[in-house]
Amino acid sequence: MIQCLENVRAGIVEPRALIRAESTKRSYNLHLCKHRDIENVHTAGVNALDVDAMEGKYLLSGSADGSLHIHDLHNFTGSPHFTSKLVCEVDRNLQTAHRYSVECVQWYPFDTGLFTTSGMDKQLKIWDTNCMKPADTFSFEGRVFQHHMSHIATRNCLVAVATSVNHILLVDLKSGSCTHELRGHTSSTLACRWSPREEYLLATGSCDNKVLLWDVRAAKCCLKSLDQHNGKGRSSSEATSTAHDGYVNGLCFTHDGLFLLSYGTDHRLRLWNTFSGNNEMVNYGKIPNDTKKCMQFDITIKCDPQLVYMPSDGNILMYEIQTGIKVNTLLGHYNSVNSCICHPFYHELYSAGNDRNVLIWAADYCQSTAFDEHLESQTQKKESSKRRGLFVQRNVTADTWSSDEEC
């Protein structure tokens, strides 16, 4: 590491290349953390997780019995051995708690004083963290499988809600009412995600095997219906295009918003170009997926190549997004894994499942060669640029004044 930092100081390696290489090294070598764990307080399977994006300090979890828990992730003890303690809880027996399973949780993107939850009791609750009581509650006709708020929205405060009815609902937190109904699906909607690049772009997945892209500002039908065949190879009997041959129960944008990953009960993971709507035809192989509820998976940050962490039965599978290569399988849960989420600031992965455990996966610094390989490739590029005369290394203390210049 000291030599790498010296290369950055000397200009041999760019700082961004060092960040990408170190991120790649850690992302490739996640293992079950031996020094840190989450206090085990759950009495039922854990369905959903979220880490606040402001401080990266609090982990929010929702359980199948309707209870909610918040753990403090920061270690102030000075010891590497640390257990994240429970700081807040909403017991399932409280009148304000969800009556049935909590399917989705999310922190308010701009403040830890607010978080949202939804579940099988057909309700979306907006919680005040200071008093741990609902500030507002929205009731719907169908069971809520997922909801999502945009992390980049500055001019609206919309929550997209996917329910067992065949349309997406948009709830405005400022007005406290349901403002839009996005009609285009013909069956229950299981997943919805806002784009991290375009403030008004929304992706939705449904039991009708479709993935639709919406511009919520337009008073018309969806922008695109994604076609797994890119308009080719379909039989004449197929009237509409489908993204999967089964229910679409998982969606996730890459962090630059250029690509979208969809997950279906046809045991397939597909990569889509969000601008053209084309299937990138990346083969990830068969990924077991038999659940009829929303699956939460996540993508690495500042990693090259980018990796996706996929829950599948009792395992977590790691794939390179652009090539479809399976990198690793993370083993640690004793039952089905329901949720995976990356820490927004650290190279850590949090996973939860029906075994009532929340596990922390951290980097192993001793086994990876990706860091050295990436730096070596960057150094080779610099050397080739020097030979072509495209890169000139200058002495910062040298006199650059020309003797021919007139005073």
Image: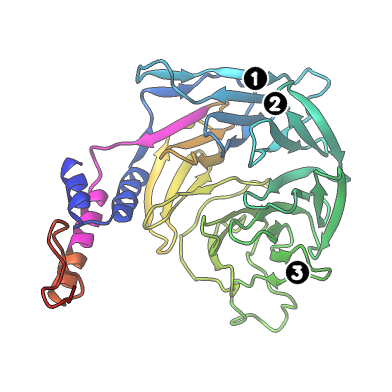
Picture layout, residue 129 above or below residue 125: above
Residue 320 placement, left or right of 356: left
The C terminus lies in quadrant: bottom left
Q: Give the distance between the C-alpha atoms of the residues marked 1 and 3, in whole angstroms.
A: 40 Å
Quadrant including the N terminus:
top left
What secondary structure is found at the residue carrying circle 2?
loop
Q: Distance of mark 1 from mark 2, alpha carbons? A: 9 Å
Range of magenta residues: 358-379
Left or right side of 20 for 324: right
Of callouts 1 and 3, which one flags the residue occurring earlier in the amino acid sequence?
Answer: 1
Q: Quadrant of residue 376?
A: bottom left
88 or 249: nearer the eye?
88
* Distance in Å between CA atoms under marks 2 and 3: 36 Å
Amino acid type indicated by mark 1? Cys
Q: Which mark is residue 88?
A: 1
Identify which residue is drawn at 55% across, 60% down.
257
Q: To which residue does mark 2 refer?
A: 129
Say if mark 1 contacts mark 2, CB within 8 Å: yes
Q: Nearer the viewer, residue 206 or 290?
A: 206
Front label number (2 vs 3): 2
Query: What amino acid does circle 2 point to?
Result: Thr
- Left or right position of 303 against 291: left
Tell me residue 179's x, y (percent): 86, 53
Is 377 colored magenta in this rendering? yes
